Amino acid sequence: MSEGYKFVKVDYSGGGDSGYIESNGYTDDGDVNIQIPAGLEDYIYQILESNYGGWEINEGSDGVFIFNFNDSTVTLEHTYNTEENQTDTLYEESFAK
């Protein structure tokens, strides 16, 4: 998969009750046609479930796995999506006599 690239990035996204990993990664030169092997996809799902269980539920989460071939590391940049409720009184008037 490295094919001489410095790194390959793989995006994922979750929401509702499902989540997915992009089947194609992208590289330092912007190439987005790097096919992700099934074993690597399984690894990504395993890391997400082990560290961020529920990443695909409700508002979900998203992020990117960065596979750095220069130093043989993988970095996960994860973003939680949250729901927030806020109540404001925008107008109030007395209707008493």
Image (cartoon, rainbow, N blue to C red):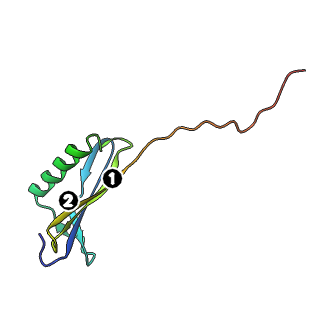
Q: Secondary structure at mark 2?
A: loop
All told, the count of numbered labels is 2
Q: Residues within 10 Å of mark 1 (few under 14, many from 20)?
A: many
* Residue behind mark 2: 23
Quarter of the image for the N terminus: give it: bottom left
Q: Is residue 10 above or below residue 29?
A: above
Q: Position of residue 86 (x, y in %)?
A: 57, 38
On the image, the x and y values in percent for residue 97 come to: 90, 20
Residue, far top: 97
Amino acid type at mark 2: Ser
Q: Which quadrant holds residue 38?
A: bottom left
Q: Which residue is mark 1?
A: 62
The residue carrying pointer 2 sits among few (fewer than 14), some (14 to 19) or many (20 or more) residues within 10 Å by Cα, namely: some
Q: Nearer the N terminus, badge 2 or badge 1? A: 2
Q: Position of residue 96 (x, y in %)?
A: 86, 21
Residue at the spot 75% in from the left edge and 37% down from the top edge: 91
Q: Secondary structure at mark 1?
A: strand
Q: What is the C-alpha distance between the residues marked 2 and 1?
A: 15 Å
Residue farthest to the front, as pictured? 71
